[in-house]
Amino acid sequence: MSETSVAKGRLPDRIVALRGRLFARINGDEGIPVPSDLIGVERFREVYSHPAAGGRSKGAALSDLFWYWLAPGPEMHQEHLEAGERYEAVARVTRSLLAVPRAGAEELARRCAGRALADVRGLVRLRDLMMPLWAEFAFELVFAEPCPRLARDLIAANADDVVSSLKCTGLRHMRRRLRLTAYLLDRLGRVRLPLPAGLSPTQQAYYLQGAFFNTAVVQLSEAMAHLLLVLAQHPEAQERARAGDDAHLDRVINETLRLYPLFGIAHRVTTGDIELDERTTIPAGSVLCFDYPAFHRAGFAEPDRFDPGRFDPDRSDRPVKELNHIPFGIAANRPCPAWRLAPIAMRVVAREVLDRYVLASSVSHTRSLPSRGPCLLTPLGARRRPGPALAYLRVRDRWEDIWRGLTQLVLGAYMVWDARRQRLCERHFASAEEHPYARPGSDHRSGS
């Protein structure tokens, strides 16, 4: 669901539209949208899966912006590594670190949730509540030992800084991020599996920071904030999930990720020609912009309506796996390596929350969720008079929408300009071409 599909005509929506036009003007005219008139929704999967749709960073002006947001070390971020031996080595380690038995993953998620939810009640921001939980979860996946308070705070601060800059609600704080890099450098010898060979210690730290302590923590925190906010705003779905209906909870998770996909636009650079038909060919070097929200809306009746029944095999007119639903990407083009682990852990954490609280919220729910998901948590069995709190939430949320939208406009415009000025991605590849035999372990603190 796009933000502008909600409450059209309000000032925040006009600000979002203005920000989009401004970003396009600064970035220039780059990218072929998918789906579009050129590439219809029926060919989305085909083009996404095409072997030539595999370039990640090199040759796209958009990459300068994403590298800027993901610094330090975006050149070692698994999502942005080009195909080759380095990517394969990094991906193998990631898969191995994520390949924990189901029972172990569930127990780890349960323990982390128990600590994060201790003594919590009242009005919270769901993303803020979830971030320390997933910081501890990711730490134990990597190091196989309990997460110290210092590490949890460093990881959560780093992840919050990354996602806040991505949503243009705050500027980057590189010193905050580099504190985590320094911490990881000191602990490389304690990672529970061997790290990719051929990388310098700094590159190994950047890899861990990008894959586990940026992407994993941010995406799991965002996903859980969306899921809990959906449950807070749909009491019937919440009660049915609380009653222990696992199939229903799985359908709620799927519908949440359909309505609020964690990816907005995924850009890929074509490494060869892609022939669409006898008269139309997408040339090598083109930037394809795959629009997840548009794809997730196509082919569904009333696509903006929350309806977990869409994923009930007894109700669907086609197999669930054939629906326009790719929350973890497509198998033929680097799917999210946590596609198996993430739903398992999310289900456990959702149950831990539902076993403790009744959730309620009256805020607007958009895909980017810049509000961080305000929600009222009332312990089960406690007296509930949510009316005044929900009225307060509603008014505060509408007011915050205005000043937050203006903040995003100003800070977002500055960061887009600064990213284009620094050209982190462009300069990285230009340097590699100029000095192809440069020592691979050289230190490069991108964007510091």
Image (spheres, rainbow, N blue to C red):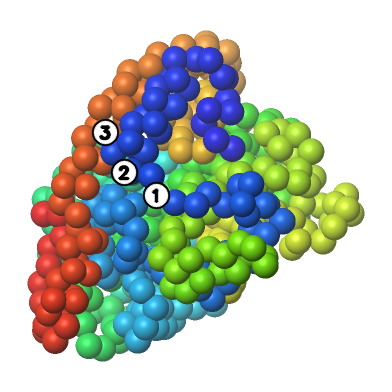
List x then y, in percent, for residue 319: 82, 61
Q: Nearer the viewer, residue 444 or 433?
A: 433
Q: Amino acid at mark 3?
A: Ala
Q: Quadrant of residue 246?
A: bottom right
The residues tagged by marks 1 and 3 sit, at their Cα atoms, a distance apart of 17 Å
Q: Is residue 443 visible?
A: yes
List x then y, in percent, for residue 189: 20, 81
433 w.r.t. 13: above or below: below
Q: Earlier in the sequence, mark 1 or mark 3?
A: 1
Residue 40's disc number: none
Residue 26 left/right relative to 6: left
Which circle, 3 or 2, is nearer the viewer? Answer: 2
Residue behind mark 1: 30
Residue 214 left/right relative to 7: left
Residue located 67% across and 52% down the image = 40
Residue located 58% across and 28% down the image = 5
| Label 1 Cα crowd, 10 Å radius (few <14 / some 14-19 / many 20+) | some
Indicate the secondary structure of the residue bearing disc 2: helix
Indicate the secondary structure of the residue bearing disc 1: loop
327 w.r.t. 431: above or below: above
Residue 27's disc number: 2
The residues tagged by marks 3 and 2 sit, at their Cα atoms, a distance apart of 10 Å
**Contact (Cβ within 8 Å) of mark 2 with mark 1:** yes
Residue behind mark 3: 413
Quadrant holding the N terminus = top right
Which circle, 1 or 3, is nearer the viewer? Answer: 1
